[in-house]
């Protein structure tokens, strides 16, 4: 080593400064002009150029001038594109093979199929403890010889400390699953999946509810609409009343022409969802419970009987980015803090992420991270900062996992309906009221790879989709 005392972090900060200056200088080049198709798309959308922040650069050569950079250093709201920061940080810090465990404890003696004591289920942030895995967890409990619990099932959710959450506060849509709050014992995203199956002979559509919820009156059928009725807006036709946690009511009808349809809704009482789901599933499996399902903490010194293990982080990240799952993203974010602290909080996760950012990218353009999902009015990042992160990610060992987690334009995920050339890019999309964004990698016809970050902040942002499509297509054509 020629410079044994040289601080690697100083080198990264210097590199960050060079990149920032390079990007600015590139745009200042009088020879660089807006792509004509992008300019035309902006005009058709009646959007000013100032609504857009753009950074387009070679993915592998961070020293090269940007192909296009405009307002690249301006902090803007990225919407769900912020998930790129969360997921890359998690892949880098935790590793693609990282998993979450949900230990189950048996406190008492099992004899003749009966447990005289309590069962404890301890949540540790598993973001994918869905219906099937809850079923398997309770089946494994029965495999321990437990059929009757003469006591309680206690849910330990103490691994996360998050502020009180009003699911309707963000956009007035409390029953949308994307508004679910993180929970150390998150079951099925706190959502009920209703499957409607027409039975023309009986004149009804049968409704299946997953998971089964204890103590909730679930309407088993819905009348079929007249045979001539089109499918149309079938959800509105049901005239559902789902705001009462004690029952579901459908006052409308269902068209047989819809065939089988699935509707996922967030449960009206999020805090009580886990208890109802666990008890409902336990009883459906034939288990008996003399006590109740309640919140509590695992007694000190008690050893787990077994544990449920989640899919690997690489698979979870794919769900987060392909389908923009907000609550899963928040769990990944909080898990960054859980590796350093006994209890995870958003503040702890923010501290870990910013430390990681500075270690990887220096002090240039750090993001303002709220909950890690981008479901926020306060989150901010610059196109330059996000672009530099994507360049750094391209040459990192976890690049394959990150890139494969992104929607492919015109093919799958949130960009399956994109009008860009199908298969030309792996991009994360993001949208909120007044925000539309894409960021990721574009695969040019020449075989080169480019980083593209394009973020629109404007009251008419929803009209900017053709603008972003034009940018993707232009980036895919080498100059």
Image (cartoon, rainbow, N blue to C red):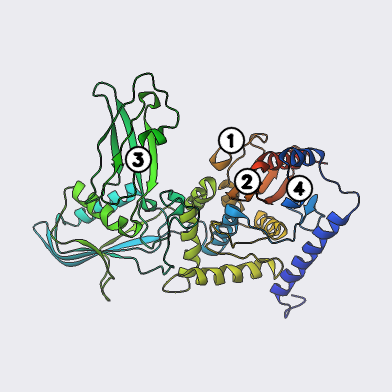
Q: In this view, does 356 lie above or below 436?
A: below
How far apart marks 3 and 2 lie (CA) works out to 36 Å
- Check disc 1 and report the residue beneath it: 417
Residue 59 shows up from this direction: no
Q: Along the line of sight, which residue is nearer the eye, 479 or 31?
A: 31
Q: Are marks 3 and 4 in contact (CB under 8 Å)?
A: no
How far apart marks 2 and 4 lie (CA) works out to 24 Å
Q: Along the line of sight, which residue is nearer the eye, 64 or 241?
A: 241
Specify few, some or many for label 2: CA neighbours under 10 Å numbering under 14, 14-19, or 20 or more: many
- Answer with left or right where residue 287 lies relative to residue 12: left
Q: Do the residues labelled 3 and 2 touch (CB within 8 Å)?
A: no
Q: Are marks 2 and 4 in contact (CB under 8 Å)?
A: no
Percent x, y for residue 61?
77, 54
Earlier-in-chain disc, 1 versus 3: 3
Percent x, y for residue 450?
73, 47
Q: In this view, does 106 lie above or below 215?
A: below
Q: SS at mark 1?
A: loop
Residue lying at 41% horizontally and 32% vertically, measured from the top left = 234
How far apart marks 4 and 1 lie (CA) works out to 25 Å
Percent x, y for residue 310?
39, 55
Earlier-in-chain disc, 3 versus 2: 3
Quadrant where the C terminus is found in the figure: top right
How far apart marks 3 and 4 lie (CA) works out to 41 Å
- Check disc 3 and report the residue beneath it: 240
Specify few, some or many for label 3: CA neighbours under 10 Å numbering under 14, 14-19, or 20 or more: some
Which tag is nearer the camera, tag 3 or tag 2?
3
Q: Using the image, tell me which numbered label, if any, was put on residue 427.
A: 2
Q: SS at mark 4?
A: loop
Quadrant where the N terminus is found in the figure: bottom right
């Amino acid at each position: 080593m020629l410079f044994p005392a040289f601080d690697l972090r100083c080198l990264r900060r210097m590199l960050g400064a060079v990149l920032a200056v390079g990007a600015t200088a590139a745009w200042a080049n009088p020879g660089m002009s807006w792509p004509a198709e992008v300019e035309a798309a902006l005009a058709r959308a009646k959007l000013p150029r100032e609504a857009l922040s753009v950074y387009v650069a070679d993915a592998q050569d961070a020293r090269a001038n940007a192909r296009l950079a405009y307002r690249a250093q301006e902090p803007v709201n990225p919407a769900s594109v912020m998930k790129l920061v969360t997921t890359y940080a998690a892949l880098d810090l935790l590793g693609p093979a990282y998993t979450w465990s949900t230990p189950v404890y048996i406190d008492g003696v099992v004899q003749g199929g009966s447990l005289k004591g309590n069962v404890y289920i301890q949540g540790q942030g598993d973001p994918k403890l869905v219906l099937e895995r809850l079923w398997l967890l309770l089946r494994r409990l029965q495999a321990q010889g437990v059929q009757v619990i003469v006591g309680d099932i206690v849910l330990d959710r103490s691994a996360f400390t998050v502020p009180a959450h009003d699911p309707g506060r963000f956009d007035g849509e409390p029953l949308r699953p994307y508004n679910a709050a993180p929970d150390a014992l998150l079951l099925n995203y706190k959502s009920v999946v209703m499957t409607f199956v027409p039975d023309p002979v009986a004149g009804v559509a049968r409704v299946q509810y997953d998971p089964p919820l204890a103590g909730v009156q679930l309407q088993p059928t819905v009348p079929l609409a007249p045979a001539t009725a089109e499918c149309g807006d079938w959800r509105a036709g049901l005239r559902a009343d789902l705001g009462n946690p004690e029952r579901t009511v459908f006052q409308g009808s269902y068209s047989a022409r819809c065939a089988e349809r699935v509707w996922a809704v967030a449960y009206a009482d999020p805090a009580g969802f886990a208890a109802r789901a666990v008890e409902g599933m336990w009883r459906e499996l034939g288990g008996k419970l003399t006590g109740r399902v309640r919140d509590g903490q695992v007694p000190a010194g008690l050893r787990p009987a077994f544990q449920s293990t989640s899919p690997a982080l690489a698979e979870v990240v794919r769900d987060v980015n392909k389908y923009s799952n907000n609550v899963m993203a928040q769990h990944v974010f909080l898990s960054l803090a859980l590796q350093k602290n006994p209890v995870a909080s958003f503040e702890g996760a923010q501290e870990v992420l910013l430390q990681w950012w500075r270690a990887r990218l220096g002090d240039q353009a750090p993001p303002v991270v709220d909950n890690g999902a981008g479901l926020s009015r306060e989150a901010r990042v610059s196109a330059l900062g996000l672009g530099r992160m994507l360049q750094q990610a391209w040459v990192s060992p976890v690049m394959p996992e990150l890139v494969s987690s992104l929607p492919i334009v015109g093919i799958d995920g949130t960009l399956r309906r994109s009008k860009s050339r199908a298969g030309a890019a792996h991009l994360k999309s993001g949208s909120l009221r007044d925000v539309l964004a894409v960021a990721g990698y574009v695969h040019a016809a020449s075989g080169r790879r480019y980083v593209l970050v394009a973020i629109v902040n404007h009251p008419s942002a929803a009209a900017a989709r053709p603008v972003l499509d034009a940018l993707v297509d232009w980036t895919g054509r080498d100059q």
